Image (spheres, grey):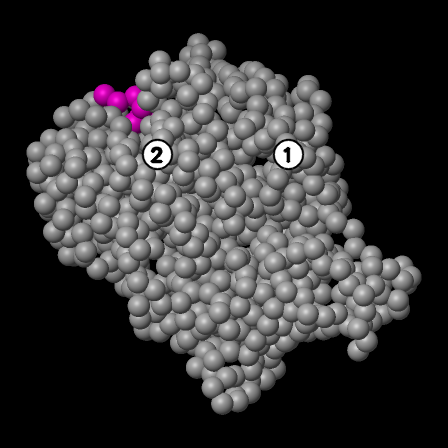
Amino acid sequence: MCPIVHHYAKPGRGFVYPEYASNYPPEYNYEVKNYLLHLTVDFDRRSVTGRSEIHIRLLKGQPGWIELDASEMRIYGVSVDGRPVEWDYDGRRLKFKAERPELIAEIEYSATPRKGLHFVLPDKAHPQRYPQVWSQGETNYNRYWMPLPDHPVVKFPNELVVRVPREMVVISNGDLISKEVDGGSATWHYKMRVPHSGYLISLVAGVFEEIVEQGDGYVLRYFVTPGWRSNAHLSFSKTRKMIDFFSDYLGYRYPFNSYSQVTVAEFIFGGMENTTATTLTELTLHDEKAHADFSSDPLVAHEAAHQWFGDLVTCKDWSHIWINESMATFLENLFVRYDKGEDEFVYELVRDMDSYLEEYRNRYARPIVTRVYKFPSELFDAHAYPKGGLIVNTLRSLLGEEVFRKGLNLFLKRFEYRVADTDDFRKVMEEVSGRNLERFFEQFFYNAGHPSLKVQEKWDEERGLLTLKIKQTQSDDSLEAYWLPIKVEIKMGDLRESLQVELSEREETIVVPLKRRPDYVCVDPHFEVFKTLEYERSDEVWGRVLREEEHVYCRILAARALGKLGGPVAIEALREAVLKDPFWGVAAEAARALGECGGEMAKSSLLECLRSVKNPRVKRALCDALGHFRDEDVAMALTEVLMNDEESYYVRQSAAISLGKKRDGRYRDVLLKVIDKPSHNHSITVGVLRGLSEIGDEESLRVIIRYTRDDVPTVVRAAAIICLGRFSLNKEIIDVLTHAARSENFRIRQAVIAACRETMSPEVLPVLNSLVDDVYEMNRRSARDVSEKIRSHMEKGSEYRMLREEVEKLREENRKLVDRMTLISKTVELKG
C-alpha cells in the first residue's frame, strides 16, 4: 500500500530563505466595471502623463476606502463622479474615499517608470534604432505606469487612449476603435471588451511593418522590426495553424476577435501573452539560413496557448501559476505532436525533463503549488514550466485523451473570463472522469521532488518467466513511494507484449510468463509518466535497444546509457545511430554520448560522422562532442566547419566553442578571423567569444574585454561579460563587472550575476551586493543565490574549494545561460 500523502509532506530544499512567509491573495472591497486610460507618452523624458477613469462598484454597497496599486508616481488629483475627494498616497498605494456604491473615479498622474514600461532608444550600440516603448506587466509591474488593482484575481474590461509621435504604430489589447492624427502626434484608441487581469494590459509603440492575415473568425496581425517583413513568415507562418489546433483540441474557439504579435527590442523575456496582443523579443526573427536549425514555433505556440490558459482563464493567485504556465507548456508540446509527429513530441518531453532536472539538481526542489515565496517572479521556473507540463501530460495519460479533453473544455467554459485555482481544476477533472484525483494532485502538485525508477530484468529459461524488479530510488526530498500506473512493453523478436502495472511500493516484483526469451523490456515507452528511469543492463542489450527499438524514448535512454558505459560495443552502436537513426534527436543524443565515451575509437567515429551527416542539428551535437578531444585532426575538422560559409550559423558557433576547448593559443587567430561574421543573433561572434574564454590566455582576455563595452550589441556584450568568469580575477575584470552591474539593461545585469557565479570568488561579493536590490526581483534572487553559494564555499574552507566538481556544474549552468540568452529555443528559458 502506498504511504499516506498529504500537502507539503515534502516541502523541498533550497528554495525558501529564512524570512520567507506565506502569501495570500489580497481582498478587494470593489470590482472594476471598466477602466479607461488616457495616456501621453514622452520619449524625451521617458515618462508618461495619464488620466485614469475607473468605473467601480463597491461589493458590499457601503461607503469605504478604495485602494489601488500605484508605484513611484506623481498624483495630481483624484475625483469621484467629477468632484474632488480626499486621497492618500504613500508612493506605493493610492487610497481615496468612496461614498456611493457605484462611481467613476478619475486620477490625474504622471510617472517615469523604472520597470513595467520600458523605453528603448538609440544608443552607442544601436545608433540607428527606432525608438520604442513597451510594457511588461507580469507579475505586478503595470502599477508603475497606471494605477490599478494589480493582482490576477481582479479582472475587468479596459480601454487605452494613447498619444504618441505620428510616425509610430500603437499595439494594445482588443479592438482598434480609432486613430486620429493631430500635427506631429497621433492618438490611438483600443478597447478590450471582456474582462482580463490587469497584468495583461499591454502598450507597445514604435515603428513597425505590419502584416495582416485572416483566420477563421479572427484577424491575425504581425508587427515586425523594419527590414524583417520578407522573413516574418519564418517566425509566424504557423500561427493560424496553432490557433486552429488549440481551438479544436480544447473544443473552445479562439475567444477574441483578433490576435497580434509584435517583436520589440531589448525585451526582458522571450514573450509575454498579453490578451490578444503578445509581445515577443525581436531575437526570434531570423533568416532562411538560421531556419535550418532555429525555430520560433515553440515561443509562438506557447504564447498563443496562453490566450486560453492565462488570459481567458487566469490563475487566482501566483501560487497557482502552473494553470497558466504548465498548461501553455503542455499545449505547446502538443502542437509539436500535431505538427511534426510523435517522435518530436516525445523528444520535447525528454528535453523538458532535462530542464527540470537541471534546476532540481543544481538549485532547488519545491512543490509546484506553494504560497511560500518572497517575489511572485521566483515561481516562474522549471518547476512551473517543464515539470508542470510533464505532470499535465501524465494526467492526460491517466484519464485518457477523450476524457482529458472534456475536462479542459469544461474547465474553460466554467471559468471563462474568471480566475481559478488548483482545486478548481482538480474538481473539474474529477467530475468528467468520475475518479478521485486527490492522490495524484497531492503527489505531484503539493509536494516537491519526483519518482525515480530503477529496473532490473531477469529471465528464467527453464520456467519461461520474466522477472522485473522495479525500485523507487528517489531521494529524501521526494516522497518515499509514489503511486504510478505505468505501461511496460516486452520485445520478443517481431512480437511485442504490453502490460499495465500499478506501482505503489518502494520496491516491487512483477513476474510475467512468456513463450520465448525476451530481447528487452521498455518501461513507459511513450514517456507518459513523470519520472526518471534507469536500467541495470549490459552494453550489448543497450546496443540492441538503440538499433531495434521503435520508441524514441527508449532509444534516447539507450544512447545516454551507452555514453556512460563506453567501450567498443557502445561506441559502435552509437556511431551507427548517428549515421542511421531515422530521427534526428536520437542521432544527436548518440553524437553527444560518443563525446562522453572518449578515446581514439570514439574520436574517429565522430570525425567520420561529421564528414557524412547533413542535418545541422545533428552536426551541432557532433561539434559539441568533439570538444572533448584535443587532437590536431579534431582541430582541423572543426576549423574546416568554422570557416565554411555553407554551414549553419549555430553549427559554426558550436565549432568555435569546441575549437577553443583545445586550449591552444594557435587557434586564437582562427577564431578571430570570424569574430565579426554576420550571423543570426550574433551567434558566431558569441561562439568565438566562448571559444576564446576556453583558451583562457591574456590575449584572449583582451579581446573579450573589448566586447564588453557599452557600444556592443546586448547579446554579444552579455556573452562577453559571462565569459569573464572563466578567467582568474584581476582588477580590470572586477572593474568591468562593477560598471556593467550599473547598466540600465536587464540582460547585462543578469550577465554580471552569471559571471560572478562562474568565478565563485569572494572578490565578486561587492558586485553581487550591488545587485541584491536590483529593480527586477529575478536578478535580486539570482544575486542572492550566488552570494550565498560563495559564502558557503568560504565557510567550508580551502580543502573543500579544491573539489572542483561543484564549481564545474555551476560553470555548465552558465554555458547554458549563454545559450538561453542567444538561442531562443525553449520558452521555459525565456520568461521569468
Q: Which residue is mark 1?
A: 20
Residue 470 visible here: no
| Amino acid, disc 1 | Tyr
Q: Which residue is mark 2?
A: 758
Q: Residue at x 60, y 43 (%)?
A: 375
In magenta segment, residue 563: yes
Residue lying farthest top? Answer: 462
Residue 145 visible here: yes
Seen from the viewer's position, the closer of residues 268 and 637 is: 268
| Amino acid, disc 2 | Glu
Work out whether 709 lies above or below 215.
Answer: above
Q: Earlier in the sequence, mark 2 or mark 1?
A: 1
Q: Are marks 2 and 1 in contact (CB under 8 Å)?
A: no
Position of residue 654 measured from the top left corner of the image (x, y, whole percent): 24, 44
Please identify the dominant SS of the magenta region.
helix
Say what secondary structure mark 1 lies in: loop
Say what secondary structure mark 2 lies in: helix
Seen from the viewer's position, the closer of residues 690 and 163 is: 163
Work out whether 17 lies above or below 29.
Answer: above
Number of residues whose C-alpha sits closer than 10 Å to that of mark 1, classed few (under 14), some (14–19) or many (20 or more): few
Seen from the viewer's position, the closer of residues 517 and 112 is: 112
**Highlighted range, magenta:** 560-567
